Image (spheres, rainbow, N blue to C red):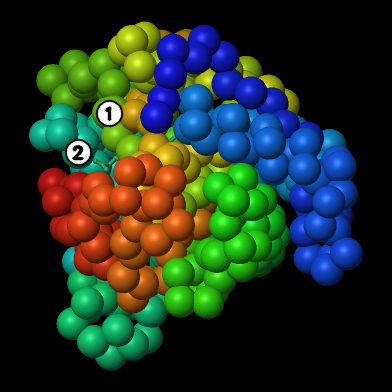
Amino acid sequence: MGSDFKAIPLIDISPLVEKIDDPAMAGDEGLLDVVWMLDDACREAGFFYVVIKGHGISESLMTEVRDVTRKFFQLPREEKLKIKMTPQSGYRGYQRVGENVTKGKPDMHEAIDCYTPIEPGRYGDLAKPMEGSNLWPDYPSNFDALLENYISLLRDLSRKIMRGIALALGAPLDSFEGGVAGDAFWVLRLIGYPVSDDIPQEERTDIGCGAHTDYGLLTLVNQDDDICALEVRNQSGEWIYAKPVPGTFVCNIGDMLKVWSNGIYQPTLHRVVNNSPRYRVSVAFFYESNFDAAVEPVEFCREKTGGVAKYEKVVYGEHLVQKVLTNFVM
Ligand SMILES: N=C(N)NCCCC[C@H](N)C(=O)O
Ligand SMILES: O=C(O)CCC(=O)C(=O)O
Ligand SMILES: [Fe+2]
């Protein structure tokens, strides 16, 4: 339900990463501890860190991904516009500062948006606006290979965390496989938040990314080590910093998990404010439902919450397309 949390918990998910695919793991004490911590985190903050010991992704890869992102954003404007995001590109590619809007206000970030490639006709009319493949820059030259490897590692990690979250809800281990997320749609946003002084005054607002919840199941954020900018809202309306902890991913749950769990777990509002004198980079990976999944409160979550469905059925792809079509001024 969310609470007056003052801090975001850190979780060592080693037992989950090592044992979650092992059929003999039921009752493993280390794993049950992790499951308990995930349950607590999802109920209280809706946010948690997974620490470097346990998540299995090397800190050097996490740093390299932020470094190539920073290098890209340092290129001249004309160079960045070579991979400009447009409706024709399926909303994939580069967007300049102020192009993304949240609740009607331009966000003070630039970004590259990447999505699971969608072949024409794959989901009929549902996915039409987002059909296409990703636009990768020519420079830095290792960009696409590096990111494709990163995406594949993060998908695997996310799947394991979702298995842990299934257990945390008391649900079957494979609840988020098959029709719900067996073919999980992924989204990668490479984001840069300029120093305020570097934005022309007439375009400037004070918010890097306005308050929002994420759209899918689980988000993993790889953020710069030295800048405090991501803020998470608690029940009293206080903004709590998700301060950088080197080597961690900041994880949070999204809208689809709320619907599926009938509100047992709810996504938490968060925003980004870069008040620091340095350019901030973050790379957000979104692990979502199947594009065409019709997500609705599952029976056993309804039973735990008074028997009545609190949310209507949502087709994930419709939810995403509706967001994408209203997120930009181009
Ligand atoms: N896929 C995700 N979560 N993207 C995050 C962007 C959030 C801001 C967006 N303008 C909005 O208003 O939703
Ligand atoms: O930059 C960050 O730390 C978070 C960005 C975010 O919340 C998003 O893109 O959904
Ligand atoms: Fe977010």
Q: CA distance from mark 1 to mark 2?
A: 8 Å
Quadrant of ligand 1: it is top left
Q: Which secondary structure, mark 1?
A: strand
- Against 6, is 324 above or below? below
- Where is residue 214? Give x, y as percent: 37, 44
Q: Is residue 108 visible?
A: no
- Is the CB of the residue bearing disc 1 within 8 angstroms of ligand 1? yes
Q: Residues within 10 Å of mark 1 (few under 14, many from 20)?
A: many
Q: Is residue 128 left or right of residue 164?
A: left
Q: Nearer the viewer, residue 256 or 195?
A: 256
Could you say which is closer to the camera, residue 256 or residue 99?
256
Residue 138 position, x and y percent, is 52, 63
Q: Which residue is mark 2?
A: 101
Q: Residue at x 40, y 51 (%)?
A: 303
- Marks 1/2 in contact by CB < 8 Å: the verdict is yes
Residue 210, label in figure: 1
The amino acid type found where label 1 is placed reads Gly
**Residue 288 picture quarter:** bottom left
Residue 123 vs 220, above or below: the answer is below
Residue kind at label 2, given as amino acid type: Val
Give the x, y percent position of residue 283: 53, 43
Residue 179 is labelled as none
The front one of 326 and 234 is 234
